[in-house]
Amino acid sequence: MDVQEKTYEEKLAEFEARIARGEKIEPGDWMPDEYRKQLIRMIGQHAHSEIVGMLPEGKWIPHAPGFRRKLTLIAKVQDEAGHGQLLYRAAETLGKSRGEMLEELLDGKAKYSNVFNYPTPTWADVGMIGWLVDGAAVVNQRMIAKCSYGPYARAMKRICFEESFHIKQGQDLLIKMVNGTEEQKQMAQESLNRWWYPTLMMLGMPDSDSPHLGKLKRWGVKVKTNDELRQEFVDLVAPQLKSVDLHPPDDDLHYDEETGHWKFTEPDYDELKRVIKGDGPCNKERMEARRKAHEEGRWVREALAVSKRKKEVPAA
Amino acid sequence: MNKEQALQSYLLALADDELILGHRDAEWTGHAPLIEEDIAFSNIAQDEIGHAQSWLRVYESLTGTDPDTVAFLRDHNEFTCCHLVQMPKGDWAYTIVRQFFFDAAEIVRLGYLKQSVYDPIREIAVKIYPEEQYHLLHTQGNVERLGDATEESHRRMQRAVDEAFGQALGLFESIPGEDVLADENIVPDSKTIENEWLQFVVPVLKRSGLRSPVDETNGSGGTDVKSWYGGRQKEHTGHLKQIVTDMQQVYRMIPGAKW
Amino acid sequence: MNDTQLPIWEVFHQEKRGAPHVHVGAVHASDEEMALRMAKEQFARRLECVSLWVVREEHVVRTNYDDPFFFARNTDKRYREVHGFPAPLKGKHSE
């Protein structure tokens, strides 16, 4: 076998040409180290967000009012576990094990979405997470479904399908409340007041503060900028919320005839930086819950790893 | 107790067991030892709660009271679940052993209910049975894997068996009115279920390297372990009140509100 | 201590009889039975499914994307392809 070794520049040119043609990069393909690193970081953060994201809503499972809401909520939080599972797997194809990624999260070395570090003091928050947080997630994930890395893009297709389901559930829950008693309606509005800006932050730092944007776009890791995604999200949800008499806490929010977009007040990005760095209202609580689950489950994983079943086919 | 009352009593006991256990199981959602198990165990929680809803629909057909009203507006001291399902989730070993004991009892009970002469019960039992078979695959499989995999897993599983065995026997406390129904071949007698359950679970435990309390007695069809009775008579552990308060918190929060 | 997340199994999903088994992802599990069960939970929770295959990740043998000759088709191979021939007769078989 006489295969001539290509230079780094030749490989990079081929790699970029492949992406420019709209072809996907697959596990086993040559890729620049930085592409691999950026993707592992992004997919890992995405997976962590799903896993940590189970907690703020999971807290309401014991209190969900009625069979339908209780079952729907368990199934929803279960889906988030499923998404985390798919995403960790996508990251694993780039050469990092799930065990390593989880340890990094628990050691505080890996980041996850800011939005799951906010508290969920009322039942309305379950609906607001479905409508807004999953709404913003879908805007972001529809973009990722077009990203250049095959396994990530494939995982995203399935995840987007389930998230759109969650958005509907969130809307259903809140619309019921808005049309209910005065107290229920207030609870829904008060929840929106708390979630609006954290959700806008969830779509990331403004473009002016995103140093790697050029390369990430060229490599098809990001297909749209954070500001584009944020605008897309506001254009989508602002009219939806207003149509059911829920009002985002932004006096300047209005539809701009000229641009065809909704004008809105930017969130406080210093708060975003603080929360991402670990200084949000619930970071400590979330990490403690994850660490506890991880440590208390360790003996189970270790036992399963060496276990031999005592019987092949169970009776009954 | 007439037949109608006996049916209502039996359906409530079945539903309460499933609902409270499903509620406990769902406490693992987001906290299980492995992401795959988180997904799998959440499924069991949903199934059990769904089964409760199914039994309560039959109850509704007899009484006109819908499942949400029964589950979310009834006082805790009106529940008739056994003590086993009320206990805190404990560690993964306790959760698995409890669920295994419950699933095994369900399989035996549903085997009879699938042949009930009362159509609504028979129809639900036929639907639920395969789901419980699948649960058993999960929980029995875990007992067989964890029973003596490591020193720690053995110690924890043995402790769970010691704790849960007597509690599980409470599943077979006679449900008020069941004699009326058993006479008409609508439901099995609880003692019959208990005997078959013992014959099923004891060998599984043994094979998994776990001691069961009946090993020291006669080994089949009887045990000296104290059975945790009282649940069917509405005498409960302190845990039930907390569960029911949590469960009904939002539902009862605002009078007249729909959710 | 290094954490174990158990071995990885690739999962293939068949939606209905007659359909092919399609790779849908992977699960972490201790053995075949657990892998099948976890595959069912993760990939047949919403999707219709009649059959699943699982295979240990390391047992999958792969071609190399970078191989320059393995899939090369540079010379004229149209004689192997349907559209390489005009349909001489009209009728069902040429459809």
Image: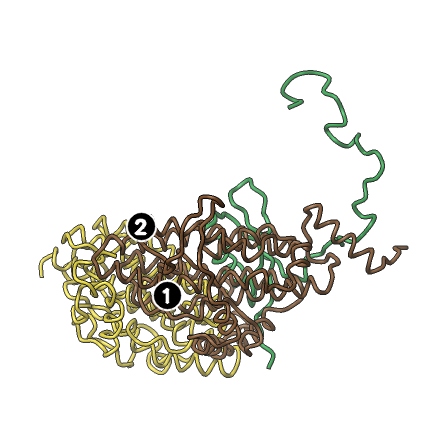
Chain colours: A brown, B yellow, C green
**Residue visible at 26% across and 77% down?**
B239
Q: Are marks 2 and 1 in contact (CB under 8 Å)?
A: no
Q: Is residue A164 left or right of residue B187?
A: right
Q: CA distance from mark 2 to mark 1?
A: 18 Å
The numbered dot on residue A194 is: 1
Judged from this view, the residue extending furthest toward the top is C89
Judged from this view, the residue extending furthest toward the left is B1
For the residue pair B212 and A221, the one nearer the viewer reads as A221
Residue B2: name its quadrant.
Answer: bottom left
How far across and how far down the image is residue C34, in percent?
A: 52, 63
How far across and how far down the image is residue B51, in percent?
A: 30, 58
Q: Residues within 10 Å of mark 1 (few under 14, many from 20)?
A: some
Residue A226, visible in the rendered structure:
yes
Q: Is residue C70 left or right of residue C60?
A: right
Name the residue type under label 1: Arg
Residue identifier under label 2: A244
Residue A120: name its quadrant.
Answer: bottom left
How far across and how far down the image is residue B29, in percent?
A: 41, 67
Q: Are marks 2 and 1 on the same chain?
A: yes
Residue B196, visible in the rendered structure:
no
For the residue pair B89 and A132, the one nearer the viewer reads as A132
